[in-house]
Each structure stands twice: as structure tokens, then as C-alpha cells.
Image (cartoon, grey):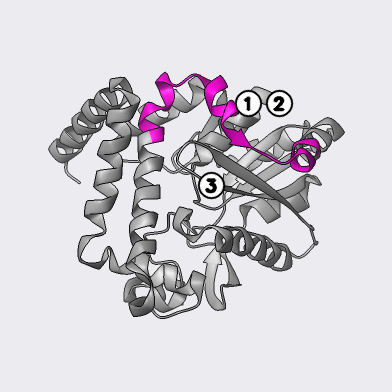
Amino acid sequence: MTSWQERIADLGYRAGWAAVRHAPESVARKSFDLVGTLAARGGGPEQLRKNLARVIGTTPEQVPDALVEQSLQSYARYWREAFRLPSTDPADIVATTYLSPEDTALVAELVDAGRGLIFALPHSGNWDTCGVWLVAHHGQFSTVAERLKPESLFNQFVQYRESLGFEVFPLTGGEQPPFEILAQRLRAGGVVCLMGDRDLSDHGVPVTFFGERTRIPAGPAKLAISTGAALVAVHHSYPDADTSQMVLTPVEVDDDVAVTTQRLADAFAAGIATAPADWHMLQPLWEADWSAARRERLG
């Protein structure tokens, strides 16, 4: 992306962000629902259909059009909530985010234990909502953000997340790699939240996911093993148009990174299977869908 393209993208995001943030809720909701519906016309994105086929155990051609539309509407809802998050009262988010009493007690128990806690999440529902809930109940946590272009847009995303109580470190290009900083936070009894279903670094761990091979990040497992922190898979979904739900699955930590990461992948799959439309995976994930360039790069 050239500098002028980055500038246009930055201005476009800023204008859209401001417009959606200040629009009436009913207008924003109808507008983004419409975007999801229109995006599903003609069968929707081919890669999304392929990914959903793995989750529900069918062929891409047999994936119901209704599921594709629901998935794109869920993705549009995520962006609507993301754009409106800076002007949304965190108390309203907490009030409409449901955890079972058992899961609520589990988080409190693990935080109070002081050994460190890692929340690992797939790209399901709205992961920022999970962060807002966590800050409201247990204070600041640390996380990593993928660096976006243009830099000004990345800084804007970081600033608004930090305003919500998140401590954000860039995945790349920071003063030092984030692993050691996150390990320090965990050893001090802190909480770390990481997205765990997309391998952005090409250093992920091979796993079987919905019956096929792929790779997911090794970070959650490596941090848990090196620090002794508890590892919990968190699945977020949209049960209806007005509420959201978090479901927690403790993951047994083994000294073997590959074994622990496979257990995490299994926990992700179990959660995603309960709400396929809310898993926002529009990119190639499985080895069978990788580009020739990535296959050559990974050997």
C-alpha cells in the first residue's frame, strides 16, 4: 500500500468510525445488518463457505445460504460494535454479556490465585467485549495487537483499546518482542489475553482442527509452560441480537507445547461448533487452502 493509499484508508476509517459512533443505535444496527445481507448475495465469500463447511461437516456447496448470511451479519455486528465501542458505556456491555455463575467464579478463583492467567480466544463474536468484561471485574490485562497499515490507523485502534483499560503491545515492530513482557506480567500474577486461532507469524504449531491440518499460534502454550500460568480457552458468541455470551474451558498445560496447543485447538473447535455463524474466519486457515507461496515458505 502506497503512502497516499494509506492516507485515504486512514481518512476513510476515521470518517466511518465517527459516523457510526455517533449514529443512533437503531440506524447503525439496520445499516450493518444490511451490509451483511448484501455481502451474502451470490453465495458469499468462497473462503468463508469453505471454512464453514469444515465446521458443520459438509461440502462448501452444501453449506446453507442462510448460515453464510448469518455469518456475515455476525461479522458486520462485530464491526458495528467495534466502531461504537469508544462511545458505549462499559457498564452496558457488561450488563449484556453473560457468563455462567460457574465460569464467573472460575475467573475470580484463577485471578485471585496470583499465578497468572492466560485467556486464549478464537476470532468469534467480539473479543473486545470479553476484554471490557474482564477490566470491569478484575482490572487491567495485557494483550498483543497485529500491526495495521497505515500506522496512524494502528495507533488509533491501540489508543481506544488502552482507553478501555487494555495494555496493548504490538505483535511486531515494538521496542522488544512481546513474549518476555507478557511473561513478566504473568509472573507478577497478571492476566494476558491472546487471539489464538490464526498463525500470523508462520511459526505456529501444527494441529488437527475440525479433522484437518492447520497451524495455530504457539504463544499461549509457551507462556503457560514457561510461567506456570493457568490457560483458559474463551469462546464468545451472540445468542441473540441484544446479548452476548462467554464460555470458558480450562486447558490442561503439558510440558510439551504441541500437546498443549492441540488441547487448545480442541477447546476452540468445541466452542466454534456451538455457534458457527459467529466465528469470523474469512481467510484461508487450513493447509489445504494455503497459497503456493506459503506452502513453499513453510516447507
Which label's residue is closer to the chain start, 3 or 1?
A: 1
Q: Position of residue 116 (x, y in %)?
A: 77, 38
Residue 93 in magenta? yes
* Amino acid under disc 2: His
- The secondary element bearing badge 3 is classed as loop
Instruction: Identify residue for label 3.
Output: 239
Q: Residue at x 84, y 36 (%)?
A: 109
Q: Is residue 140 visible?
A: no
Q: Amino acid at mark 1?
A: Val
Left-right relation of 70 to 122: left
Let me know if residue 187 appears in the view.
yes
The residue carrying mark 2 is: 138
The part of the chain drawn in magenta is 81-105
Tag 1, which secondary structure? Answer: helix
Question: Residue 213 location in percent, x, y?
Answer: 54, 76
In the image, residue 50 above or below residue 2? below
Q: Residue furthest left?
A: 4
Look at the numbered discs 2 and 1 and tell me whether their residues touch, using CB distance below 8 Å.
yes
Q: Which mark is residue 135?
A: 1
Q: Residue at x 68, y 39 (%)?
A: 99
| Residue found at x 49% / y 58% | 198
* x 42%, y 58%: residue: 281
